Image: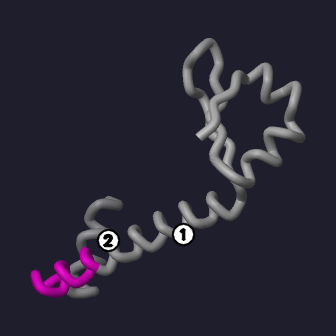
Amino acid sequence: MQYISATEAKQSLSRVLENAQREPIVIQKQKRNVAVMLSMKEYEKLTAINLEDFEKFCDLLARRAVESGLTQEKLTEIISEDGS
C-alpha cells in the first residue's frame, strides 16, 4: 500500500490514478490518513462482498423470524402499531 500527501495527490493526479490500478493509495493530510484511492475493480469487489454479506444476514433474520412464528399478518400489525 502506498502513502502520499494530499498535496502530492493533487499535483500528480494522473500518476496517482495510474498507481491506484495496481494497489490502494492512502492519502494523508497533516500526517493523518484521510482517504484511500483504489481501482474501480477493487471497489466493486468490496461492495459486492458487503452486499453479499448483507443479503446473507437478511436471509438469516427471515429464517429466524419464521422459526419463531412471525407471520406476514403479525408483521403488518407490528408495523401499523409503530406508525400510530
Residue hosting label 2? 57
Magenta span includes 68: yes
Residue 81 locus on image (x, y percent): 26, 65
Q: Residue furthest top?
A: 30
Placement of the N terminus among the 4 image quadrants: top right
Q: Relative to 27, does residue 1 appear above or below in the rendering?
A: below
Which residue is disc 1 drawn over? 48
Residue at position x 17%, y 82% in the image: 70
- State the CA–CA distance, disc 1 to disc 2: 14 Å
The foreground one among 1 and 78 is 1
Q: Residue at x 69, y 27 (%)?
A: 4
The quarter holding residue 27 reads: top right
Residue 21 pos. (x, y %): 74, 54
State the predominant SS element of the stretch in magenta.
helix
Query: Element type at marker 1?
Result: helix
Q: Helix, strand, or loop for circle 2?
A: helix
Residue 65 within the segment the image draws in magenta: yes
| Depicted 24 relative to depicted 84: above or below | above
- Percent across and percent down for residue 65 are 19, 79
For marks 1 and 2 on the same chain, the one whose residue lies earlier in the sequence: 1
Do labels 1 and 2 touch, CB within 8 Å? Answer: no
The image shows residue 81, relative to residue 36, as above or below, that is below
Q: Tell me the quarter of the image containing the C terminus.
A: bottom left
